[in-house]
Image: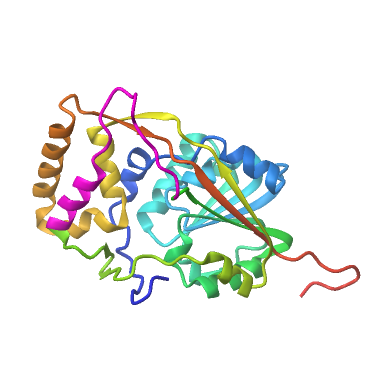
Amino acid sequence: MPEGWEWDETLFLGSARYYRRGRLPYAPGLPDVLAEALPLDGRGRLLDVGCGPGTLALSLTHLFGDIVGVDADTGMIAEAERRATEAGVSGRTRWVRARAEDLPADLGMFTVATFGQSFHWMDRDAVAATVKGMLGPGGAFVHISDLQTETLSVEGLPYPAVPYAAIKELTERYLGPVRRAGRGVLLHGTPGGEAAVLTRAGFIGFERHVVPGGQALERSCADVVAWVFSTSFSAPHLFGGRRDDFEADLGRLLREVSPAGRFSERQPSTEVFVWRKPALAPGRPAA
């Protein structure tokens, strides 16, 4: 959990409806990498913690017999349920509104637990210890995020790049220079160091995989606006009565950069970290 910050239920209030359009997907080879690395045969159980609107979990339904997504935001759970029904997999998925700190919540045992860019919002030591107890012997704790160390250029693509720096500046004009998060602020950003947390929890066998991105993407002004409102630091409720003014200013900014209303972007690569719960020693009873 970020230093000096406390979770509250407004963290992603109003953002769920913008996720599908606004957020870039994980690199397209992610399911294949997970299937090989774990390995998966379609019969295990997946616990997706901080599942949001089901983005990660719904891309993995063919790899598991049963999927449970957990998220603290009512809107995210409702969107996940809607998307599961739309995809015809509602019979094999369950969506639970709960904080990660509320686990195990009588959800049973799992083969794999995934955290798609969500672990940093949690009491990580407590959640890691609890999730370890929810995994069977040899079960996997999987942390997934965009690769932060690559530089992606839109040179040679047909439209301008999304003006992220200018969007940040505009957002700060409305919300202030310190990143907002729910009712609080992130004075020191979000924490890293997941390896140390999971080692303390007793996980072993660390592996790192990178799923390559780089594919050319085309984004509309509406896509970029949806991205802005899908983030915790510019969730719709943060603007209060000035939201319409902000959205109008954002639209003008985007049209100035691209009069055609189109932007080029590169698909980020996806970074996957896998830790294992130790397998039982021969003849040793389960704890």
Q: Would you place residue 208 above or below residue 100 in this image?
A: above
Q: Would you place residue 41 above or below residue 281 in this image?
A: above
Which picture quadrant has residue 33?
A: top right
Instruction: Find out whether residue 82 is within the magenta segment.
Output: no
Q: How is the image coloured?
A: rainbow
Q: Would you place residue 173 above or below residue 64 in this image?
A: below
Please say whether residue 104 is visible from this viewpoint.
Answer: no
Which picture quadrant has residue 280?
A: bottom right
Q: In the rendered image, which quarter contains the N terminus? A: bottom left
Q: In the rendered image, which quarter contains the C terminus? A: bottom right
List x then y, in percent, for residue 134: 65, 66
Q: Is 191 situated left or right of 156 in this image?
A: right
List x then y, in percent, for residue 131: 60, 67
User: Residue at 39% across / 38% down in the picture?
Assistant: 152
Prevailing SS of the magenta stretch: loop
Which picture quadrant has residue 216?
A: top left
Q: Would you place residue 281 above or below residue 113 in this image?
A: below
Q: Is 27 situated left or right of 106 in this image?
A: left
Instruction: Find out whether residue 163 is within the magenta segment.
Output: yes
User: Residue at 53% across / 65% down in the picture?
Assistant: 194
Residue projecting furthest to the right: 283
Closer to us: 208 or 33: 208
User: Residue at 33% across / 66% down in the picture?
Assistant: 9
Please say whether residue 239 is visible from this viewpoint.
Answer: yes
Q: Is 212 situated left or right of 177 in this image?
A: right
List x then y, in percent, for residue 215: 45, 30
User: Residue at 26% across / 63% down in the picture?
Assistant: 179
Q: Which residues are magenta?
A: 149-173
List x then y, in percent, for residue 242: 10, 54
Closer to us: 237 or 94: 237
Q: Is 62 situated left or right of 136 in this image?
A: left
